Each structure stands twice: as structure tokens, then as C-alpha cells.
Amino acid sequence: MSINEQMVQDIVQDVLAKMQIASDVQGDRGVFKDMNEAIEAAKASQKIVAKMSLDHREKVISNIRKKIMENAEILARMGVQETGMGNVGHKILKHQLVAEKTPGTEDITTQAWSGDRGGLTLIEMGPFGVIGAITPCTNPSETVLCNTIGMFAGGNTVVFNPHPAAIKTSIYAVNLLNEASVEAGGPDNIACTVEHPTLETSNIMMKHPAIQLIAATGGPGVVTAVLSSGRRGIGAGAGNPPALVDETADIRKAAEDIVNGCTFDNNLPCIAEKEIVAVDSIADELMHYMVNEQGCYLASKEEQDALTNVVLAGGKLNRKCVGRDAKTLLGMIGVTVPDNIRCITFEGPKEHPLIATELMMPILGVVRAKDFDDAVEQAVWLEHGNRHSAHIHSKNVDRITKYAKAIDTAILVKNGPSYAALGFGGEGFCTFTIASRTGEGLTSASSFTKRRRCVMTDSLCIR
Ligand code: NAD
């Protein structure tokens, strides 16, 4: 192979980018060698946070938002480079979304009753103290930043045990959070972590008496571990969201929305469309638009088999395929496609391994259903009882309601791309911790607080 000038330039660019990222990883505020030290530091910090006014907490949060916006590109590049997963442009958008739409102290509200007994009773949302948080490699800094804004708004500090495959990116985010706090007159160590997170450091965290609440964002293993820890747990687990399309939908728009949602950050978001269930009468039309207008590559039976062998090598999800783009995935099976190919599609039964498994890559199998009821049944099966996310494209409100009740998920997007559920092109706030297993749903500051009843008798009712 001969080396031309362009190749040399590409190599130089790559090395410069790596050097830039290496020099970006400088600060180590909140980073400890030992998990017990990290927890003690977060505990000392929380004593200060507990005395801060809500206004002061909000001032810190504003500075965190500003710093996330300033660092969105660095964080996005670092995340992609360290994990090898995702898309830089989309990750920038995800960080901007965290900065702009993660709720702060306004989410901490008070409920009040006053009445005939002449008194006043309040329900106040108070902090747990130090929260333990376990974060995934798929949205590493997004989750660290989003969790901390909510937890800190609720008066807590947080200790992270991040995914080891994303530790640099997570440390960068932790440092940024503490810098933002100190600059705004808050304490250091509002977010802490360890240099080398392992299952052992995770266990230390889960058993430490200072940790009364653990928020786990990841696959089924970590959620089960946290729910077995004896601590209160917020379990944000796996999904396998189906997108159901019926004959009343705008089929062309459904194809566009579904492929946009599926390919966002190379399908890493847990809420992203992972497969389609289409009623028979519109299935061909839908696939026509997907292939001819939305950059989907129609994989042959042989290509599906080859992909299955690579993606689910030995029946196990191949981490080297997770979060890769369609062109790269096809390259792994020796198929060369142009750059405008952004998704791989094919028709298959719901049991097809590339359809039934949560892959987190832009492979979007289409399951044909004979009618709407059959589509609901197949979609419910494909969601595997995770009760996480599901999507539907239909103009029939009764059908949407029927589907919503049958699939019973924390998120159901109607007639839009899945990311609308995160507040991106949809109403509502942003989160990267969707507590499907434990029922909090889309978490925000109030999810990280405990309810306290304050009762005053015989006074303060002025009605
Ligand atoms: P993962 O389960 O491999 O890892 C998640 C975190 O849990 C990591 O920090 C990991 O080190 C830790 N972990 C794993 N097993 C553990 C155990 N037994 N004890 C303690 N810690 C353990 O997941 P991932 O690949 O990083 O992320 C992808 C998965 O997370 C997908 O299944 C996706 O659906 C899910 N996810 C869910 C949400 C949500 O909000 N519900 C958000 C993002 C990702």
C-alpha cells in the first residue's frame, strides 16, 4: 500500500486530536484513589450543600450548564474516542440538551394542606445525603452531568462508579462539575469518583453506611445488583424499544422519524428504536421509504447471517459493534457502501436474533404483523417486559391508547422520533436515567429526594 499526502494529513490530524484530548484531561477535582476516601469527601461536601440556599444551589447549577455548553464538543470527542462508540455531532447535541433541559431546583416543590384544624402541613423534598451512582459507557458524561445536576439540586452530593471503559470522559465531567461549583462559591467534591472503578469499588460504595440511595443506569446486571444491595435503589435498566406502524400513519414521515431516532448517536440511547413492527398492508411502503429516502441498506439473507455472526459472536453481544455506524458494521462483513447509508434493515420474524436482542447499533429489522392487534402482541413480546420505551406511528387515538396500556412502558413516543422523549424536538425535560424497573420513570431532581412531612397545628391557616 502506498502512502499519499492525504493519508499523512489524516494521520497527523488524528494524532493532533488525540494530543488535544490528552491535554484536556488535566483536572482531577473529585477524583480519588480509594472509594472510601471519595465517599468521605462527598460526605463533607454534602454538609456544606445542605446549608446552601436554593438560590446558591441554582447559581452553581447555572455555572455547570455554562461549562457543559463550553465543553460539549470536547466531551463528545472524548466519549467517542475513548469508548469507540457513537457520533460526535450527536453527542454534542446530547450534552447541549443536558445543559439546557435538565431540571434544577425548580423541580423541588412543596405540597401543602391547611384547613379546619387551623394548622398547616407541608410535604418537603429533602436530600438523601450522598448518593451512589453507577453510569454506563453508552452515554458516559451525559449521565454523570445530568445525574449531578438533579442530585445536587435536591441538596445531595454524589459518588460515581462509572463504566471503566469510559473513565477518562467521566473524570473529565466530574472535574468540570467541581470546578463549576467552586467558581460559583460552592464546595469542591459535589461529585466524586475513583481513578479505577471496578466491581469491588462498586461493592464498597453499595455497602457504605453513608450511601442511602443508589442510582444505577445500565444493563440488567447492574440494576439487579443494586436492587439486591439492601439500599434504596433507582434502577434504570435495559430496553428494546419497538416502533409500531399501522396503516393510519403518515408512512413516509414514520420512515423518516424512525430512522432518525434509530440512528441518533448510532443507536446508543436506551430509548432509541431497536426494531419495527409494521402491519402487513403498509410494511412494503414503509420499507420502500426507508431504503429509497432514508439511507437504509437492505441486507440480504446471507448478509443478515454474516452480521449475526459478527454482532452476536458466540451468542454474546460483540462490544466492538455497539455504537458503530452502519457503514462500519457493513464493512465488518465485507460489504462496502457509500457514506449516505446510515442504517441496516431487513424483514424477519420477531425471534430473529438481530431483532429480539437489544443491539445498540443502527440495525433495524422489520417484523410484519397481519393487523394492529397482532402488531401489539408482537411489540409487547419484543419489549421483553422491560417496560422501558416503545413508540407508535398511528393517527388512531383508540389504538394508541390500547398499545400504551398493553406495553406499559415508562416512555411512549407517538408520531415522532424516539429522542423527542428526551426533550429533543419534544416537550418536557431531559434525563439520561430512565428508571423503568423501579418506576420513577424519567428521573429529575425530585426523584433524588425523600419526602418529609412538616406539621404545624393550630396556627398558620389564614383561610
Ligand atoms: P453495563 O450494564 O455493561 O454497565 C453499566 C454500569 O454498570 C457500568 O458502570 C458497569 O461497570 C456497571 N456494572 C455492570 N454490571 C455490574 C454489576 N454486576 N455490579 C455492579 N456494577 C455493574 O451497560 P452499558 O453497556 O454501559 O450500557 C448499556 C446498557 O445500559 C443497555 O442495556 C442500555 O439499555 C442501558 N441503559 C439504560 C438507561 C436507562 O436510563 N434506563 C440509560 C442508558 C443505558
Image (tube, grey):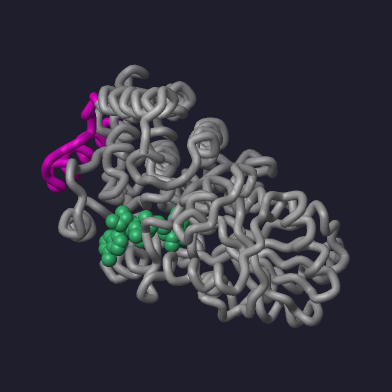
Judged left or right of residue 234, residue 266 is right
Quadrant placement of the N terminus: top left
Numbered marks: total: 0
The quarter of the image that holds ligand 1 is bottom left
Determine if residue 372 is in view. Answer: yes
Q: Which of the pair 305/375 is nearer the observer?
A: 305
> Does residue 49 sit above or below 363 in this rendering?
above
Q: Residue 462: x, y in percent?
A: 63, 39
Quadrant of the rendering where the C terminus is positioned: top right
Camera-nearest residue between 205 and 377: 377
Residue located farthest toward the front when viewing the structure as drawn: 2
Q: Main secondary structure of the magenta part?
A: helix
Residue 114 vs 330, above or below: the answer is: above
> Residue 155 versus residue 291: which sits nearer the camera?
291
Measuring from the top left, give residue 135's x and y in whole percent: 35, 51
144 left or right of 382 in image: left
In the image, is residue 130 part of the stretch drawn in magenta? Answer: no
Question: Could you say where residue 375 lies in the image, as x and y percent from the top left?
Answer: 73, 77
Q: Is residue 430 above or below residue 352?
A: above
- In the rendered image, residue 209, in percent from the top left (x then y), is placed at 18, 55
Residue drawn at point x = 21 percent, y = 40 percent: 43
- Displayed quadrant of residue 310: bottom left
Magenta span of residues = 26-48
Q: At 76% across and 49% down in the image, what residue appears? A: 293
Q: Residue at x 27, y 38 (%)?
A: 168
Q: Is residue 158 above or below residue 182?
A: below
Q: Quadrant of residue 343?
A: bottom right
Residue drawn 75% across the image and 63% down it: 287
Q: Is residue 113 visible?
A: no
